[in-house]
């Protein structure tokens, strides 16, 4: 049963007060060390690690996650072990250590595959693909993104589909395969629209606009940028001035027949 300190930590976390959430989760860890069960200690450490990760205290977050991992292995909690390995991978990814992130993600895959946790596997393959991309392993990145899409479809993860189609589209752009990039980015846009995620839709449309400009398809590029500017206004996105300037310049070029 969670301690009172853990419950207070959760309350402050939901309020967005991360300093207080960290304080109370630290107290919870002390309480659980003094007489709690290994499972409750693991949960308290995991919560503390999550808060530390958010506030970018990566060193403390890793200390927490590694102790959590030791406890979970003792308790033989397969899904929880996989989740903690992913958390460790995310820490390495956030600090630009792609090789170490990749290693944790691969270990997490070995743990989660036999458990058939399809939702977690979809997210994990997307994370792995991003690190392969960072390491310039483009073919491996594309393969991992495509596997991620299969899992996202299987469990109906619309957020995962939208983000992964966008990331795969960007990867195809880098390889110069504009036809596949266009298909992926259009899919990403459709899923972001379903989700009502305007900023995500705008991100995919910006990439499409880049591609259409490269193709000298000004009409399609203008359609994308017109929608992007509309989203910028609606959501008060910081890219508004830059996007609007780009849109106006492209309109003027079209008017001049350039």
Image: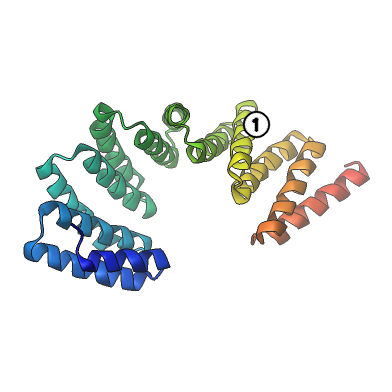
Nearer to us in this view, 37 or 236: 37
Query: Left or right of 16: which side holds 27?
Result: left
Q: In the orientation shown, which residue stands out farthest toward the right?
A: 256
Query: Left or right of 249: which side holds 7?
Result: left
Q: Residue at x 9, y 44 (%)?
A: 74
Question: Looking at the picture, does residue 246 appear above or below residue 254?
Answer: below
Number of marks in picture: 1
| Rendered image quadrant of residue 177 | top right
Q: Which residue is mark 1?
A: 182
Taking the image as drawn, is residue 16 in sight? yes
Query: Left or right of 98: which side holds 39?
Result: left
| Rendered image quadrant of residue 57 | bottom left
Query: Left or right of 109: which side holds 206?
Result: right
Q: Residue at x 74, y 40 (%)?
A: 213
Q: Residue at x 69, y 52 (%)?
A: 231
| Rendered image quadrant of residue 211 | top right
Q: In the orientation shown, which residue stands out farthest toward the left?
A: 35
Mark 1 closeness class: few <14, some 14–19, many ≥20 residues within 10 Å:
many
Give the percent coordinates (x, y) of residue 258: 87, 42
Give the percent coordinates (x, y) of residue 183: 63, 28
Taking the image as drawn, is residue 55 in sight? no
Question: Looking at the picture, does residue 20 appear above or below residue 96?
Answer: below
């Amino acid at each position: 049963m969670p301690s009172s300190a853990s419950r207070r930590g959760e309350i402050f976390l939901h309020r967005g007060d991360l300093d207080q959430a960290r304080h109370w989760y630290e107290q919870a860890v002390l309480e659980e060390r003094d007489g709690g069960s290994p499972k409750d200690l693991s949960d308290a450490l995991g919560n503390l690690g999550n808060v530390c990760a958010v506030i970018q205290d990566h060193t403390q977050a890793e200390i927490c996650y590694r102790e959590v991992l030791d406890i979970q292995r003792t308790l033989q909690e397969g899904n929880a072990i996989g989740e903690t390995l992913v958390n460790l991978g995310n820490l390495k990814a956030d600090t630009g250590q792609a090789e170490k992130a990749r290693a944790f993600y691969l270990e997490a895959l070995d743990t989660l595959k036999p458990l058939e946790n399809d939702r977690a596997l979809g997210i994990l393959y997307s994370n792995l693909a991003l690190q392969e991309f960072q390491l310039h392993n483009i073919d491996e990145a594309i393969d991992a993104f495509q596997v991620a899409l299969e899992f996202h479809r299987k469990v109906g993860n619309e957020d995962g589909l939208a983000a992964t189609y966008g990331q795969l589209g960007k990867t195809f752009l880098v390889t110069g395969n504009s036809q596949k990039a266009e298909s992926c980015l259009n899919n990403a846009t459709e899923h972001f629209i379903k989700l009502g995620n305007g900023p995500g839709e705008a991100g995919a449309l910006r990439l499409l606009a880049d591609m259409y400009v490269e193709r000298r398809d000004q009409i399609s590029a203008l359609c994308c940028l017109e929608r992007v500017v509309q989203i910028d206004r609606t959501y008060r996105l910081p890219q508004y001035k830059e996007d609007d300037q780009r849109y106006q310049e492209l309109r003027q070029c079209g008017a001049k027949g350039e």
